[in-house]
Amino acid sequence: MLGCNYNITPLQENTNTMKSIVYIVAGILFGIVMAKSEAISWFRIQEMFRFQDFHMYGIIGTAVVLGTLSVFLIKKFKMRDFYGNPITFNPKEKTWPRYIIGGIFFGLGWALTGACPGPLFVNLGYGFYAISIAIIGALLGTWLYGLLRDKLPH
Amino acid sequence: MDWILQPWPWHISGLLIVIIMLFLIFLGKSFGFSSNLRTLCSACGAGKTAKFFDFNWRSQLWNLLFLVGSVLGGFISYQYLSTGEPVQIAESTIQDLQALGIAAPEGLQPMEIYGMENAFTLKGFLILFIGGLLIGFGARYAGGCTSGHAISGLSNLQLPSLVAVIGFFIGGLTMTHLLLPIIFN
């Protein structure tokens, strides 16, 4: 791919340092949860795809149940975000081929490397530097999708 | 404080993931990790090659910061929050994997895939590279990954996300049960 673009625009008011720190902290917490729950482990993903333990289903299941309840309450009480703006959820497009075909490609890669996009980067931080090969692959795969997008069924 | 060094139970982990998702929602954003791959392509100039990458990637800077945080989180976990003990996976999984020539866990990851010396053999390299290629291509094709579809999408009762998750499993089960035995003959 082309060389990286390092142009930096002056920081705008809405991207001040304080807000930047908030996202880094959220990311750190995410990385720690992924590592400590062992969701970044290839072994745990194998166990999941072999239906031999409840661990991964427990993590995703708990998140989905509590997440569904939270989203329901946010909508019901028309909650606003920290800046006072209404919280909106964008519905996904209702066209099916992309979800099933794209999903299958994704699942093949997930089971092979034992990592989905988040854990690719958490593993890197954990010191498994070999995963950089998969990260480069994932960037190229994303780029490939962008190039082929108009030719693929969605 | 010993509990923090042990693996965290699934219910605590699931709860914390929702807290992270809600935190992002209340900041006016959404929880979806794989968008970062598109943003990174765009930041590297891919906008010149495809319309898909021709957008103001700086508007997604917040998510890139989240990505940087996740790398730091992995580092902190390794450095300060772990005992380095093997992952306690099911005995049946250990046996299945041994049949593929993958040794029982000695840490978090199998060295047959994650070890540097194996990653730079042709086969080891291709496993990681093609795996990554499939993840990146599939996530963008499906419009999201585990965070965007399985967590955020399902929480918002999105049928397309359920279809994507079914796709994840068709792919994952095919790889695990049909292709891994060929790859690791």
Image (cartoon, rainbow, N blue to C red):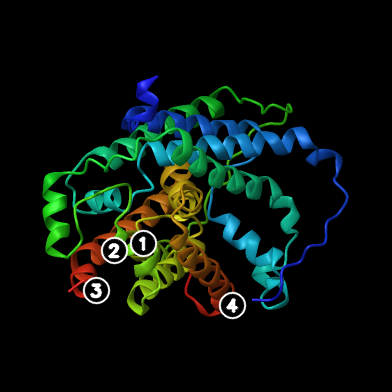
Q: Does residue B157 appear left or right of residue B72 in this picture? A: left
Q: CA distance from mark 3 to mark 4?
A: 29 Å
* Residue highlighted by disc 3: B183
* Tags 4 and 2 both on a single chain: no
- A44 in relation to B128, above or below: above
- Residue B52 in sight in this render: yes
Q: Chain of mark 3?
A: B
Mark 1 nearby-residue class (10 Å; few <14, some 14–19, many ≥20): some
- B106 in relation to B174, above or below: above
- Specify which label sits upstream in the sequence, 1 or 3: 1
* Tags 3 and 4 both on a single chain: no
Q: Mark 4 or 2, which is nearer the eye?
A: 2
Give, as a three-letter code, the residue at label 2. Answer: Glu
Q: Chain of mark 2?
A: B
How far across and how far down the image is residue A66, in percent? Answer: 41, 29
Q: Mark 3 or 2, which is nearer the eye?
A: 2
Give, as a three-letter code, the residue at label 1. Answer: Gly
Q: Chain of mark 1?
A: B
Give, as a three-letter code, the residue at label 3. Answer: Ile
How far across and how far down the image is residue B116, in percent? Answer: 40, 64
Q: Element type at marker 4? A: helix
* Tags 1 and 3 both on a single chain: yes
Q: CA distance from mark 1 to mark 3?
A: 17 Å
* Residue highlighted by disc 2: B112
Q: Which mark is residue B142?
A: none
Q: Element type at marker 1? A: loop
- Residue B155 in sight in this render: no
* Tags 1 and 4 both on a single chain: no
The one of A15 and A83 positioned closer to us in this rendering: A15
Give, as a three-letter code, the residue at label 4. Answer: Leu
